[in-house]
Amino acid sequence: GIKTKTGGTMTETHYTSSTLKAILLIIILTATSSAIEFTLDSPQTAKVNEPFQVTISSSSQETHDVKIIIFDSENEIISEIYNDGWKNPFYYIKSIFPEQTQFEIKPTSYSETAEICARLRVPGKSNFDQSCNLITLEKPSEQQQEELSPPVENEQITSPVTPTADLPDNNLPSPQIENNPPTINNDAIVLNNPQSSEPNEFTSKEQNKRLYIVYAFTIFTIFIIILLALRKL
């Protein structure tokens, strides 16, 4: 009886172990089948703001979403991808591979160390497969930098030119400008005339007394002359 019981326990343990192995095998096979092997063909060097092409190659014919990004040394996105116009590469291009295998990429800024990565995922899923290559970015030339920002440079150039161009124009009507100050000065003189006449209008008390005496004497003299003339008549 003891032997039979021991044999049953060993059988149950063996069955449980086989079940776990089968589950692990299914998980591994599922993960392997969902993964896609592909290669990213990209140039080793590229110039900033100049587009270039990359190619994704794979033996799989299953439809995948695609995302291609250039990362700088701080893992920041420094590129754009062309898809009916230059777009942010952060978002996947839905269900485009393997219908399209070549893509146009453009670096947008310079970084001493950069890496270009392509990501493929099955539509509707979050997990993805990735392939990356190192890429050397070249700084844009001075001429390209000038072409990228013409409005700013034109403003800097024209701003000093306008005052220098205005100087001859200001020198031509200078006689008219010189004539304007006299009018202003005349107004000032007119305004100052009452002030200058104030000393003439305000006299001292002694001068007033003298004037009153002179006026009274003159009136008195005229009065006497009139009386003498009437007596003679």
Image: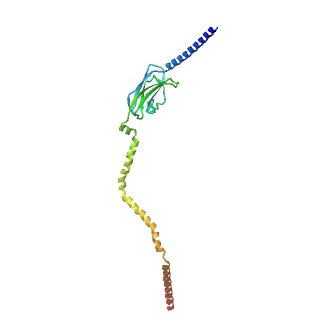
Task: Name the image colouring.
Answer: rainbow
Left or right, 4 with respect to 138, comes to: right
> Residue extending furthest front?
2
* Residue 11 picture location, percent across and down: 59, 11
Q: Which quadrant of the structure image shows residue 80?
A: top left
* Residue 224 picture location, percent across and down: 50, 88
Indicate the quadrant containing the N terminus: top left, top right, bottom left or bottom right: top right
Q: How many marks?
A: 0
* Residue 187 picture location, percent across and down: 44, 64
- Looking at the picture, tell me which residue is in the foreground, 50 or 212: 50
- Looking at the picture, tell me which residue is in the foreground, 102 or 210: 102
Residue at x 42%, y 62% (from the top left corner): 184
Residue at x 39%, y 59% (from the top left corner): 177
- Looking at the picture, tell me which residue is in the foreground, 24 or 190: 24
> Residue extending furthest bottom?
232
Q: Is residue 46 above or below residue 231?
A: above
* Residue 226 picture location, percent across and down: 50, 87
